[in-house]
Amino acid sequence: MNVHEYQAKSLMREYGISVLRGEVAKTVDEAVEGAKKLGGSVWVVKAQIHAGGRGKAGGVKLAKSLDEVKQYASEILGATLVTHQTGPEGKKVLTLLIEEGCEIDHEYYAGLVLDRATGKITFMASSEGGVEIEKVAEETPEKIIKVAVDPSAGFTPFIGRKLAYGIGLKDKEQIKKASKFFHGLYNMYVEKDCTIAEINPMVTTKAGEVIALDAKLNFDDNALFRNADVEELRDPTEESAKELEAAQYGLSYIELDGNIGCLVNGAGLAMGTMDIIKLHGGEPANFLDVGGGATKETVEKAFTIILSDPNVKAILVNIFGGIMKCDIIAEGVIAAAKSLGVKVPLVVRLEGTNVALGKKILNESDLDIIAAEDLADAAAKVVTAAKGEA
């Protein structure tokens, strides 16, 4: 789950992480009033969408008068920003953050992720902030330092100092402030079940402060039950309607650009299914994981969501029965196909618990189902069917 920059900064304040004052606006008038409330003579008008690269797309403007605040707010609100993270369709801007200005001395990068190779939460920091960290990693990797946090010890003052010295800070007060900044970031990451915490840029100011000038936080969907305050920050306008509907039924659905619908149980199997479809020259239209506790009703709902995509020309059902029994899936497939009147080719591959019973149920139905013996066979058949060659 993603949140907007202004929401991320609100959470960060709770952990003692320094951020600039800002006002949220959904209209041009609110933007101007927000700037007046903040005072000063310089403001930053920021588009609030769930994507990076807003500045390059024209979504971040420095205003030096209230007239410029009004002008930039008018230009950005309602505009569609296309960045490297939105895809070509872009995202429409419905909300602005009007933030006070500051005198920047230097820009840095600070981030926290789980390093799966070591099983540890790991800081990444760099003296090169304000640019894409991927570019820094490619061109000057020596300017990125990594510090893993031992889960048995947690964050220690040594880690804070190592990060501060590593990015080139020398002033003792700034080192203390940076260490406090990193400590707060770590505590928030752990307590709020973040998957990514990225501050780009983190800045030092002429006045000697250490501030998060931007913020990107992602959260683990599976941990939202213990972070109700985070779940309240969800913005449905930033998410696919199909994905939100799927979540209501316990389905994991991600919309893609292809024409082959995928209904699979298990995230790993779903990714493997998409890979083998591409290997055979096809393009998946979605990632849909019905999970281990699916019922006939949830399978039917999964079909409804898949078929709501007009680009879908064929569907592949790939089930490995473990907790999820193949006969339950077969009954769900038949019920869905009959009630929805499925018009596109349907390829089904079953394996695992109750597979014989599942195949028997499918074979005895009066549906035109293309049976597959294994995953490669299923991929080849569904790609052929999607091309209208079946």
Image (cartoon, grey):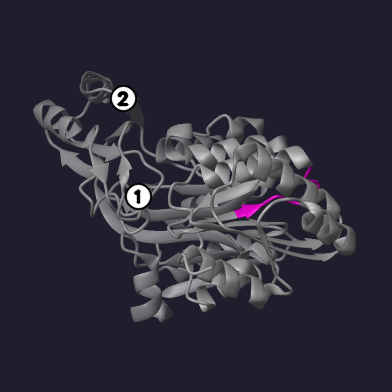
Residue 297 shows in the view: yes
Q: What quarter of the picture does the C terminus occupy?
A: bottom right
* Residue 341 image position (x, y, % from top left): 60, 41
Residue 324 shows in the view: no
* Residue 378 image position (x, y, % from top left): 65, 70
Q: Earlier in the sequence, mark 1 or mark 2?
A: 2
Q: Which residue is mark 2?
A: 26
Q: Residue at x 72, y 40 (%)?
A: 298
Identify the disc placed on residue 327: none
Say whether residue 69 is left or right of residue 259: left
Per the image, is 80 magenta? no
* Residue type at numbered disc 1: Gly
Q: Nearer the viewer, residue 157 or 311?
A: 311
Q: Residue at x 34, y 55 (%)?
A: 87
Q: Residues within 10 Å of mark 1 (few under 14, many from 20)?
A: some
Say whether residue 143 is left or right of residue 194: left
Secondary-structure class at tag 1: loop
Q: Which residue is mark 1?
A: 208
Q: Nearer the viewer, residue 24 or 260?
A: 260
User: In the rendered structure, which segment of residues is drawn in magenta?
Assistant: 288-295
Q: Nearer the viewer, residue 135 or 1?
A: 1
Q: Work out how far the residue at label 1 is from the one at label 2, CA to CA, in angstroms.
A: 33 Å
Residue farthest front in this picture: 366
* Residue 200 image position (x, y, % from top left): 38, 55
Our reading of the magenta stretch's main secondary structure is loop
* Residue type at numbered disc 2: Lys
Q: Residue at x 16, y 35 (%)?
A: 75
* Residue 268, picture quadrant: bottom right
